[in-house]
């Protein structure tokens, strides 16, 4: 298994369920969730990752 240098989300202040990000190259971003028993790793590129972050930020704003 590949060893990733994971960075924990800044929104992971409480609990054990945290999203972790690792960029192995400028064009490859890996995402995982700390409580996933299968330890699944999603791999994407920067454009799709930016779209995901934008959608999450928009959803967060509209909920408050």
Image (cartoon, rainbow, N blue to C red):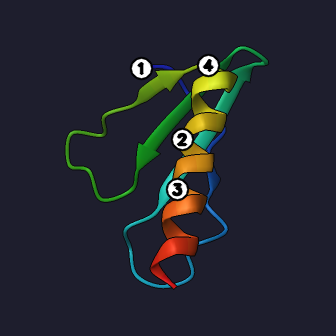
Q: Earlier in the sequence, mark 4 or mark 2?
A: 4
Left or right, 11 with respect to 1, comes to: right
- Specify few, some or many for label 4: CA neighbours under 10 Å numbering under 14, 14-19, or 20 or more: some
Q: Residue at x 48, y 63 (%)?
A: 59
Q: CA separation, marks 4 and 2?
A: 11 Å
- Specify few, some or many for label 1: CA neighbours under 10 Å numbering under 14, 14-19, or 20 or more: few
Q: CA separation, marks 4 and 1?
A: 20 Å
Q: Residue at x 66, y 36 (%)?
A: 50
Q: Is residue 38 above or below residue 54?
A: above
In front here: 63 or 33?
63
Q: Earlier in the sequence, mark 4 or mark 1?
A: 1
Q: Is residue 53 visible?
A: yes
Left or right, 31 with respect to 47, comes to: left
Q: Residue at x 62, y 44 (%)?
A: 6
Q: Which residue in the protein does label 2 denote?
A: 52
Q: Which mark is residue 1?
A: 1
Q: Earlier in the sequence, mark 4 or mark 3?
A: 4
The quadrant of the image that shows the N terminus is top left
Q: Which mark is residue 45?
A: 4
Q: Earlier in the sequence, mark 1 or mark 2?
A: 1
Q: Which mark is residue 28?
A: none
| Image position, residue 58 (x, y; %) | 57, 60
Q: Is residue 4 visible?
A: no
């Amino acid at each position: 298994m590949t060893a990733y240098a994971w960075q924990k989300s800044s929104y992971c202040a409480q609990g054990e369920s945290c999203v972790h990000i690792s960029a192995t190259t400028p064009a490859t971003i890996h995402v995982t969730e700390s409580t996933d028993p299968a330890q699944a790793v999603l791999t994407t590129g920067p454009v799709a990752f930016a779209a995901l972050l934008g959608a999450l930020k928009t959803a967060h704003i509209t909920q408050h």
